[in-house]
Image: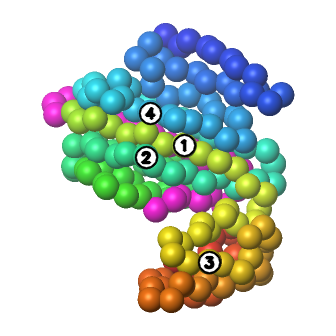
Amino acid sequence: MAARLFTATIICGLMFTTVTSVTGCGGDLTAPSGGPVTSPNYPGNYGNNENCEWSITVPEGSIIRLTFDSFYTEYGYDFLTIYDGASDNATEMEELAGYHSQISPIISTSNTLFLMFTSDGSVSRQGFQFNYTSSTAGQCWDPGLPANGDRDNNSNFTSGQTVRYTCMDGYQLRGTANITCQPNGTWSGA
């Protein structure tokens, strides 16, 4: 078993504890928001035969949103698997491999996520970098403002609330004009 290093940092009065191996791989993440979290040696190539596990736990009653800044692993051989719960016995949400220029945010159904990264013994790539944030269940994250447009709701993103988008003259909306915050913290449309 690899030796483990323990570090702790206070952020706004909440404990952020990271457990990492000698290679900087894996850990227990407990702050309401955190990152960036990276694969070993990022932005350089990760090593061969990596086995990294991250456990993310945010306050009870919250859900977790993962967003990726970059992702590039060896397709078909090196995987990041994301589970909706506290271990790899939970429901698998995503298994990512290869190059992704953009990954849609991944949202948990509870206050825990478990991530497992494994690489084989040959080719390695740059790896990945992600961030996470927590939100109270029943609330959605800010859906953003379109360039050359506006929305009618700028602050209340709770379950059942609808946001209406409009465009400036000469511009056409791509996506859905009205989106509603769902109980699971996601929006009903793009």
Dot in front, 1 or 3: 3
Q: Cα distance, mark 3 to mark 2?
A: 26 Å
Residue 150: give x, y in percent of width and height.
62, 77
Residue at the spot x=73%, y=55% of the render? 135
Q: Is residue 33 above or below residue 166?
A: above
Residue at the spot x=72%, y=81% of the render? 152
- Local packing at callout 4 (Cα closer than 10 Å; few below 14, some 14-19, many 20+) is many
Q: Is residue 30 left or right of residue 66?
A: right
Q: Which residue is mark 1?
A: 131
Which mark identifies residue 69? 2
Q: Cα distance, mark 2 to mark 1?
A: 8 Å
Name the one closer to the observer, 128 or 156.
156
Residue 43: give x, y in percent of width and height.
33, 30
Q: Cα distance, mark 1 to mark 3?
A: 27 Å
Task: Name the kind of residue labelled 1 in the image.
Answer: Asn
Q: Earlier in the sequence, mark 3 or mark 2?
A: 2
Element at badge 4?
A: strand
Which mark identifies residue 150? 3
Q: Which residue is mark 4?
A: 38
Which residue range is magenta in the image?
Answer: 104-123
